[in-house]
């Protein structure tokens, strides 16, 4: 695994053992961030990428790859939620290796119970275990706990054969299959 774009492009990422997580592949991450950077429907009203200076959440962090990729491409800060202690150690090592430890907040929490919100986020990445059905409930929990700004962008990864229905309070913007994954882009309603 590696960072696929931005200021840390090509830098390696450590990954937890496969039995504990399923990291988003480099190709899927590259496709996801290319969509974020080039799809006009996902831009801010100012006509620029929502990643620039954004606060992001990686709700099922695993290795932290989605959060670190966002930081490499212009995000200001990433909140990474991970319940597995081994995965948290890997995230911390990745942050230190990339010299990004001061730009992340690693939370030893289950994304289903996110706790009190820090500053609300501009964007959330939800890559729960495939076929778990956790994407929608976690997105709603994050919203109800105040973790999302009005008009926040949510990206949900499911397996390619899966589907994701926008929960109440969110509009579907894009839905694309990318190799083994389906990426669903949503915007929180104002």
Image (spheres, grey):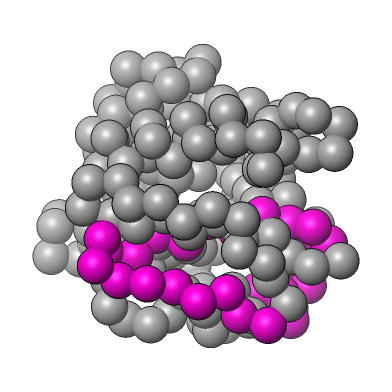
Q: Position of residue 129 (x, y in %)?
A: 30, 71
Magenta residue check for 143: yes
Q: Which residue sits at x=21%, y=53%?
A: 180
Image quadrant holding the N terminus, namely: top left
Of residue 61 and residue 91, the one placed in the foreground of this image is: 61
Q: Which residue sits at x=39%, y=60%?
A: 157
Q: Answer whether residue 9 is visible to the viewer in this image.
A: yes
Magenta residue check for 6: no
Left or right of 121 on screen, residue 88? left
Q: Quadrant of residue 158?
A: bottom left
Q: Position of residue 133 (x, y in %)?
A: 38, 82
Of residue 43 and residue 26, the one placed in the foreground of this image is: 43
Q: How many marks?
A: 0
Image quadrant holding the C terminus, namely: bottom right
Q: Quadrant of residue 66?
A: top left
Q: Position of residue 4 (x, y in %)?
A: 36, 25
Location of residue 71 with respect to 159 vertically, above or below: above
Location of residue 162 with respect to 69 vertically, above or below: below
Please report the bounds of the magenta region as a residue range. Answer: 142-168
Q: Which residue sits at x=43%, y=21%?
A: 5
Left or right of 8 on screen, residue 44? right
Q: Which residue sits at x=50%, y=76%?
A: 165
Q: Position of residue 100 (x, y in %)?
A: 54, 31
Left or right of 82 on screen, residue 55? right
Location of residue 171 with respect to 27 vertically, above or below: below
Location of residue 74 with respect to 177 vertically, above or below: above
């Amino acid at each position: 695994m590696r960072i696929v774009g931005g200021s840390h492009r090509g830098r390696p990422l450590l990954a937890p053992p496969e039995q504990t997580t399923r990291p988003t592949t480099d190709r899927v991450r590259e496709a996801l961030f290319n969509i974020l950077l080039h799809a006009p429907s996902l831009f801010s009203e100012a006509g620029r990428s929502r990643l620039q200076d954004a606060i992001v959440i990686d709700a099922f962090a695993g290795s932290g790859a989605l959060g670190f990729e966002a930081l490499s491409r212009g995000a200001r800060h990433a909140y990474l939620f991970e319940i597995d202690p081994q995965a948290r150690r890997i995230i911390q090592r990745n942050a230190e290796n990339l010299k990004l430890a001061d730009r992340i907040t690693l939370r030893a929490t289950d994304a289903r119970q996110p706790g009190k919100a820090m500053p609300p986020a501009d964007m959330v990445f939800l890559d729960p275990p495939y076929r778990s059905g956790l994407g929608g409930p976690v997105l709603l929990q994050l919203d109800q706990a105040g973790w999302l700004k009005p008009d926040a962008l949510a990206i949900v990864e499911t397996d390619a054969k899966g589907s994701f229905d926008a929960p109440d309070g969110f509009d579907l913007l894009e839905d694309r299959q990318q190799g083994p994954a389906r990426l669903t882009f949503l915007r929180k309603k104002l």
